[in-house]
Image: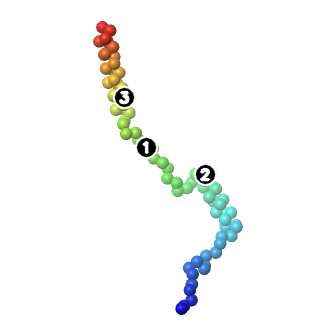
């Protein structure tokens, strides 16, 4: 049986100064909004505004003609 070497033997813990520096960098990025966050895209509605306006026009016109027919 040979000597067992660990790949993790060379990894050392960060010093408190390193931790403070990284925390300061993280805080600065969060405050200024500079990060790799993806901005959400604006979702478009399924029915267009023109289509809704067209149906309102049709319904309103139909109602107007029905009222004119009813009273005259």
**Residue 12 rendering spot, x and y as whole percentages:** 64, 75
Query: Is residue 16 left or right of 35 when viewed as pictured?
Result: right
| Residue 51 placement: quadrant | top left
Vertical placement of residue 19 versus 5, above or below? above
Quadrant, the N terminus: bottom right
**Who's the residue at 31% across and 20% down the image?**
62
Query: Is residue 47 left or right of 19 when viewed as pictured?
Result: left
Which of labels 2 and 1 is toward the front? Answer: 1
| Residue that badge 2 annotates | 32
Ranked by sequence position, the earlier of labels 2 and 1 is: 2
| Residue that badge 1 annotates | 43
**Who's the residue at 57% across and 84% down the image?**
5
Q: Secondary structure at mark 3?
A: helix
| Residue that badge 3 annotates | 53
| Residue 55 placement: quadrant | top left
Q: Residue furthest right?
A: 16
Ranked by sequence position, the earlier of labels 1 and 3 is: 1
Mark 2 → mark 1, Cα distance in angstroms: 26 Å
Q: Residue furthest front?
A: 1
**Residue 10 rendering spot, x and y as whole percentages:** 60, 79
- Evaluate if marks 2 and 3 touch, with contact meaning CB atoms under 8 Å apart: no
Give residue 5's mark. Answer: none
| Residue 15 placement: quadrant | bottom right
**Residue 65 rendering spot, x and y as whole percentages:** 30, 16
Q: Secondary structure at mark 1?
A: loop
Ranked by sequence position, the earlier of labels 2 and 3 is: 2
Vertical placement of residue 71 versus 9, above or below? above
- Evaluate if marks 1 and 3 touch, with contact meaning CB atoms under 8 Å apart: no
**Residue 38 rendering spot, x and y as whole percentages:** 49, 53
Quadrant, the C terminus: top left
């Amino acid at each position: 049986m040979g000597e067992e070497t660990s790949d993790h033997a060379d990894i050392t813990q960060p010093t408190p100064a390193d931790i403070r520096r990284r925390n300061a960098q993280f805080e600065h990025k969060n405050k200024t909004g500079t990060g790799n966050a993806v901005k959400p895209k604006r979702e478009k509605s399924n029915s267009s505004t023109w289509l809704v306006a067209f149906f309102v026009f049709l319904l309103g016109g139909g109602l107007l003609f029905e009222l004119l027919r009813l009273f005259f």
